[in-house]
Image (tube, helix red, strand yellow):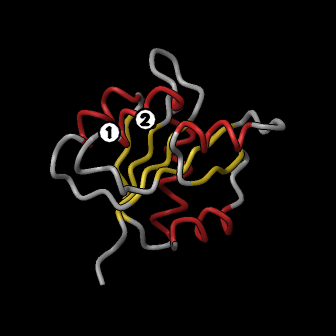
Amino acid sequence: MSKKRVLIIDDDARNIFALKATLRAKSFDCLSCLNAQDALDILRTDEVIDAVLIDMMMPDMDGYEAIPRIKNLPNRAQTPIIAVTAQAMVGDREKCLRAGATDYIAKPIDVDRLLQLLAD
């Protein structure tokens, strides 16, 4: 079985670095980009992406705008999208799911929970 490939979308390079290190240690392959537009450019291609981790609070295009755009791509309608947010407030999970996210995880990320979400 080949490694699962995860696209990480976050405007903070430190978050990308930490997530990549964590996921690679667990045998995931990772791609990353610093904004949603670059992510959409990648996702429009035939690049193998098994799951997307997207920061919900980014400048220009946030996760709430980007997730529906990703889901509207014919080749990505079934790709799991996990919303990542530091704003773990009441109603945030529901808001992320309404935007089209498959699931939601709050920062600081619970690695065991993230691995569970990616295993599904």
Q: Which mark is residue 68?
A: 2
Secondary structure under tag 1 reads: loop
Compare residues 69 and 50 and report the one nearer the observer. Answer: 69
Q: Which mark is residue 81?
A: none
Please, is residue 58 above or below residue 53 in the view? above
Classed neighbour count for the residue bearing mark 1: other residues with Cα under 10 Å, few (<14), some (14–19), many (≥20): few
Residue 68 location, x and y as percent?
A: 43, 35
Residue visible at 30% across and 30% down in the picture: 38
Compare residues 68 and 49 and report the one nearer the observer. Answer: 68
Compare residues 120 and 111 and report the one nearer the observer. Answer: 120
The quadrant of the rendering that contains the N terminus is bottom left
Residue visible at 57% across and 41% down in the picture: 15
Relative to 2, 20 lies left or right: right
Relative to 97, 13 lies left or right: left
How far apart marks 1 and 2 lie (CA) works out to 6 Å
Residue 107 location, x and y as percent?
A: 71, 44
- Quarter of the view holding residue 92: top right
- The reply to whether discs 1 and 2 touch (Cβ–Cβ < 8 Å) is yes
Q: Residue flagged by tag 2: what amino acid is it?
A: Pro
Residue 62 location, x and y as percent?
A: 51, 25
Secondary structure under tag 2 reads: helix
Residue visible at 58% across and 68% down in the picture: 115
Classed neighbour count for the residue bearing mark 2: other residues with Cα under 10 Å, few (<14), some (14–19), many (≥20): some
Please, is residue 4 above or below residue 76 in the view? below
How many numbered circles does the render carry?
A: 2
Q: Which mark is residue 72?
A: 1
Q: Residue flagged by tag 1: what amino acid is it?
A: Asn
